[in-house]
Image: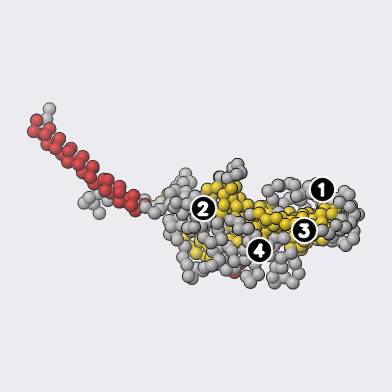
Amino acid sequence: MAPLSKLVQYSQLLSILLLLVATVIPQHVAAAAHELQGRPRQGMMGRPGCRDKCGGMSIPFPFGMDKPGCFLPGFEVTCNTSFTPPRAFLAYNHNDPPYQAIYRCKFGTDTSGCKYTYQPVELFGISLETNEVRVYGGVTSRCFTSEAAGLTKGQYMELDRAGPFLLSPRDDLVGVGWNVKSSMSYQIKPYPDPLSCTSNDPFRVTAPTGSCSGLGCCRVALPPPWPTMPVIETAVILEEAVAGDNTFWKYNPCSYGMVVEGSWYNFTAEDMAGYEVLSKKLTRGFPLVLDFAIRNGSCQRDSCPSGNSSCANAAYDSEGYVCKCKEHYHGNPYIANGCQEYLQDGQFTFPAVKVHMAGKA
């Protein structure tokens, strides 16, 4: 057994060590916390103090909600909690774009005119990696109720020419019907004529499911945006491919046109049968892709806020720039310290904060 004097020395040494632990370690923990201050929490995609979720959907900055400072101009999102789950929409200000225009026009014997209403554009996907958003677009239908008269119903999207969004060349113009020419109403430069496709099936030899080459269905890809005349509208005009030929109006009363994400629409013969069959397939609309960029800036003048990120000019020689995380980093390059490394389990991690003990380098 150790002498009493030794026990006293051990007790005093233990007291000194405990005192060091109580005073030194908290100082370094506080220093570490200060170093982390201002960094986003793991997985955070919005600016500090800003909501970054609407229902189950991520709303990453430069998109944002609720208050100035949470989003850049043109990127404001509203979260409509009257739906379950809540749904996200591009901010809508009366009849100022971006908006969805919904209209009904009679043709033939009754030409009483068109009726228009407007609503916001619903947003259901944002990708910072590809600088794209996915939204719901509408379908235009032209349906005969007699050999010479009927109703045109449509829904089209109009974007703000000065805003961040442009239609993507990943979208297609599609026409469905046995005698229809589907045309974009918005002039696409440098092409002299409106972009269009024709479906003409006079003998009703309808193409098999999935085919869209002119028998019952036609499609044409949107071209890359022309820098001085970007594509900002999805309105479609429907005409008869062969004028005056309305032989099968009782059996196939409707023709359709839409701008839709290219890989999405899969033609079936049933889409031509019945009244407004295709319009009723998806009540919220058909998906289409928009490209986005910070249009009022450039890489030469501006910089991306996050470390481990890079700046690139907007695609297709259009105005503006985009930010991207560098290879092996993921997250949000538009916020400070937003580009993070992955751990092996797929979680984000920040570079380690070193804690130096007193007297150590």
Answer whether labels 3 and 2 touch (C-beta < 8 Å): no
Q: CA distance from mark 3 to mark 4?
A: 22 Å
Between the residue at mark 1 and the residue at mark 2, the CA separation in whole angstroms equals 42 Å
Considering only order in the chain, which callout, 1 or 4, is on the residue closer to the N terminus?
4
Mark 3 burial class by Cα count in 10 Å: few <14, some 14-19, many 20+: few
User: How many tags in the picture?
Assistant: 4
Residue at the disc numbered 4: 232
State whether residue 229 is above or below residue 112.
below
Percent x, y of residue 157: 67, 58
Disc nearer the start of the sequence (4/2):
2
Mark 2 neighbour class, 10 Å CA radius: few under 14, some 14 to 19, many 20 or more: few
Residue 352 in view: yes
Calculate the distance from the C-alpha at mark 4 to the C-alpha at mark 1: 30 Å
Q: What secondary structure is marked by label 3?
A: strand
Please state which of the two labelled residues, at mark 3 or mark 2, is closer to the viewer. Answer: 3
Kind of residue sitting beneath label 4: Ile
Residue identifier under label 2: 66
Q: CA distance from mark 4 to mark 2?
A: 26 Å
Q: Residue at x 65, y 67 (%)?
A: 230
Q: Residue at x 55, y 58 (%)?
A: 75
Q: Amino acid at mark 2?
A: Asp
Going from N to C along the chain, the mark reached first, 3 or 4, is 3
> Where is residue 274 drawn, in percent x and y?
83, 47
The numbered mark, 3 or 2, whose residue comes first in the sequence reads: 2
Q: Give the Cα separation between the discs numbered 3 and 1.
A: 20 Å
Disc 3 marks which amino acid? Cys
| Residue topped by disc 3 | 114
Residue that label 1 marks = 275
Dot 1 amino acid type? Tyr
Nearer to the camera, 178 or 157? 157
